[in-house]
Image (spheres, rainbow, N blue to C red):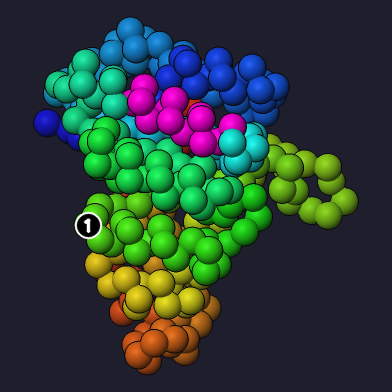
Amino acid sequence: MIVDIYTHIMPPRLLKSMESLGASSGLVKRMAAIRELHDLDARFRAMDAFGDYRQIFSIPNPPLETVTTPAQGRDLARIANDAMADTVRRHPSRFPAFIAALPLHNMDSAMEELKRAIETLGARGIQIFTHVNGHPLDEPQFEPLFASMEAYDLPIWLHPARTAVMTDYPSEQQSRFEMWWCYGWPYETSVAMSRLVLSGVFDRHPKLKIITHHLVWRVARARVRPGLFWRRQRSLRNGRTVRACCRHARWRRPSQPGKNTA
């Protein structure tokens, strides 16, 4: 049996809701073009090619907070989580679990939805992105999120948020040749995870588990200059090396957006 723990699904109602809000360009348009994300029959045909293969899924880019107001984000998170929970209930032999979506531009709503998704709908974790509308995850406002997930003893799925508008050079209007995800996503994930380590999040929450995606956490496997940096840096709480603080992070193999995306 193969269980793929980091796949995406775009429930049709969520896609329609996003499009109705005017978010029909960019990543929403790209996701809509991948039929396996929102057509279960097409998805099942793709899955059957791998034999005894099952998926744990979350919603794809874009992050809800980048295309909604806080109130809209709350509603869309509920739509997404209700739809994913229903899909898991109807197809348990295909999908053993789902990962909840949260509207992180309103932490009160996010914490309410986290509790509902896990305790009522049966989510086995949550997905967050590498920043929240430009705010790093090590800001104090997100501390309740990490505390709750440690208490539930469930993992956080961390997904890159970078888009083509984050240019490769200041003189350009957007990133070219798909560099924004090919190289940008591993970089952004490395920065987000390193900031969580260096700010002491794993010291304050030693049982916290984070699963990274898209060419994983590259700094964890880097050598030479990053290695020198890591040996010199210490955790803010107890003087351990940065590498020693990373034992709770989890990573998986690389993935390629647009190819076997379901």
Query: Which residue is outermost to the bottom?
Result: 239
152 w.r.t. 6: above or below: below
The residue at the point 30 percent across, 11 percent down is 45
In magenta stretch: residue 80: yes
The residue at the point 12 percent across, 31 percent down is 1
Picture coordinates of residue 99, whole percent (x, y): 33, 38
In magenta stretch: residue 90: no
The main secondary structure of the magenta stretch is helix
Left or right: residue 195 compared with residue 4: right
Whether residue 29 appears in this view of the structure is: no
Picture coordinates of residue 80, whole percent (x, y): 43, 27
Left or right: residue 250 compared with residue 236: left
* Residue bearing the label numbered 1: 153
Image quadrant where residue 222 sits: bottom left
121 w.r.t. 174: above or below: above
- Give 233 or 197, whichever is nearer the viewer: 197
- Give 77 or 136, whichever is nearer the viewer: 77
Query: Which residue is outermost to the left?
Result: 1
Left or right: residue 155 compared with residue 138: left
- Give 219 or 79, whichever is nearer the viewer: 79
For the C terminus, the image quarter is top left
Q: Secondary structure at mark 1?
A: loop
Magenta residues span 72-84
The residue at the point 31 percent across, 56 percent down is 149
The residue at the point 28 percent across, 20 percent down is 86
Picture coordinates of residue 71, whole percent (x, y): 59, 36
User: Dot 1, crowdedness within 10 Å: few (<14), some or many (≥20)?
Assistant: some
- Give 31 or 173, whichever is nearer the viewer: 31
Kind of residue at disc 1: Asp
Picture coordinates of residue 68, whole percent (x, y): 63, 34
Query: Which residue is outermost to the top?
Result: 41
Whether residue 139 appears in this view of the structure is: yes
